[in-house]
Amino acid sequence: MRVIFAIAFLPLGLAACGTGGNLGTDALWGSMTGNSGPAAMDAQDQRLAAEAQQKALEFGQAGQATSWSNPANQHNGQIVPGTPYKKGSSFCRPFTHTMFIDGQPNTTNGTACRQPDGRWSQVG
């Protein structure tokens, strides 16, 4: 099963190399809510979280956390992707992203689908 999964996602992983660094996670921040949400995140937090989220969605094993941490302000988080599935011509994954901003947890659950250009966009 892992070999099939790896083969199925290899072209997707290679395609992601051509995204020019655009992680396509801006829409995902919009789903975060709470008193210590993304408004409290600085540019470094957002970059680290976006990179970890892209990595988790693109390459992560279902149920396995991908973590990020900003040592400058102690903000951190983890993304746990679910099992990928195909929706139309896109691959999609549910995910949970928990961020700790100023010690307060902020968790969002969502589903993201991989776009033809390699970016992941939240759906529904």
Image: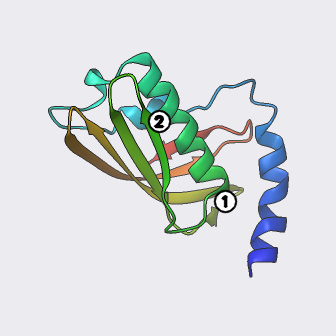
Secondary structure beneath disc 1?
Answer: loop
Q: Earlier in the sequence, mark 2 or mark 1?
A: 2
- Left or right of 77 on screen, residue 24: right
In the drawing, what numbered circle is on residue 49? 2
Q: Residues within 10 Å of mark 1 (few under 14, many from 20)?
A: few
Q: Position of residue 121 (x, y in %)?
A: 54, 41
Q: For the point 28% across and 40% down, which residue is it?
A: 100
- Left or right of 67 on screen, residue 72: left
**Image quarter of residue 41:** top left
Query: What amino acid is at disc 1?
Result: Gly
Query: What amino acid is at disc 2?
Result: Ala
Q: How many marks?
A: 2
Towards the viewer: 107 or 102: 102
Q: Position of residue 23 (x, y in %)?
A: 61, 31
State how far apart marks 2 and 1 are (Cα): 28 Å
Q: For the point 82% across and 42% down, which residue is it?
A: 15
Q: Position of residue 106 (x, y in %)?
A: 25, 44
**Image quarter of residue 37:** top left
- Left or right of 61 on screen, residue 80: left
Image quarter of the N terminus = bottom right
Question: Which label lies toward us, 2 or 1?
Answer: 2
Q: Position of residue 103 (x, y in %)?
A: 20, 38
Mark 1 highlights which residue? 88
Q: Are marks 2 and 1 in contact (CB under 8 Å)?
A: no
Secondary structure beneath disc 2?
Answer: helix
Residue 124 appears anywhere in the view: no
Q: For the point 81% across and 75% down, which residue is it?
A: 3
Residue furthest to the front: 71
Q: Residues within 10 Å of mark 2 (few under 14, many from 20)?
A: many
Q: For the point 27% across and 22% down, which residue is it?
A: 39
